[in-house]
Amino acid sequence: MTRSNLHITLSNGEKFICVLDGSSAPEQGYFVEDILLPLLSFDNGDREMSLIKKHCTMGERRANACYRYTVDLKTKDIRMFEEHYSYQKDVFRKGREITERYTSYVQILNLKDHEKGS
């Protein structure tokens, strides 16, 4: 299981942090297909929050998270980073940007959808 700390801005401007304790590597499909893509399609803060609450623990972060996603539903911008935690300093640090893993997976999904439609 790969955990991720999520930094989210809803389409209504509300900002918060939560943790996804499930499989959140893009290549595993679950997070991208069941959470991110629906969120990007809503454009409604209440619907977005409802979906997030079903899958995430609100107001928390995990020291053992592998990834940090920044999700801005106002601008439809998704960024993915390595997540680092210092036990000595009790501080989270955003690591190397690895958004290409997310975008590559979305491109594969789009290609599959295009092939189905042909």
Image (tube, rainbow, N blue to C red):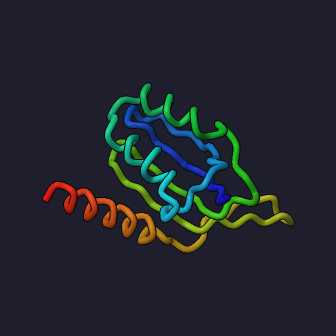
Could you tell me which residue is drawn at 62 percent across and 48 percent down? 20
Image location of residue 115, percent across then percent down: 20, 62
Image location of residue 65, percent across then percent down: 69, 59
Q: Viewer-proximal residue, 69 or 31?
A: 31
Image location of residue 57, percent across then percent down: 66, 39
Could you tell me which residue is drawn at 51 percent across and 39 percent down? 15
Q: Is residue 62 left or right of residue 74?
A: right
Q: Is residue 45 left or right of residue 23?
A: left
- Quarter holding the C terminus is bottom left
In this rendering, the answer to whether 11 lies above or below 102 is above
Residue farthest to the left, as pictured: 118
Q: Is residue 104 left or right of residue 65?
A: left
In this rendering, the answer to whether 34 lies above or below 53 is below
Residue 68 lies in what quarter of the image?
bottom right
Q: Viewer-proximal residue, 109 or 95?
A: 109
Residue farthest to the bottom, as pictured: 96
Image location of residue 7, percent across then percent down: 55, 49
Residue 58 lies in what quarter of the image?
top right
- Quarter holding the N terminus is bottom right
In this rendering, the answer to whether 76 lies above or below 47 is below
Could you tell me which residue is drawn at 78 percent across and 66 percent down? 86
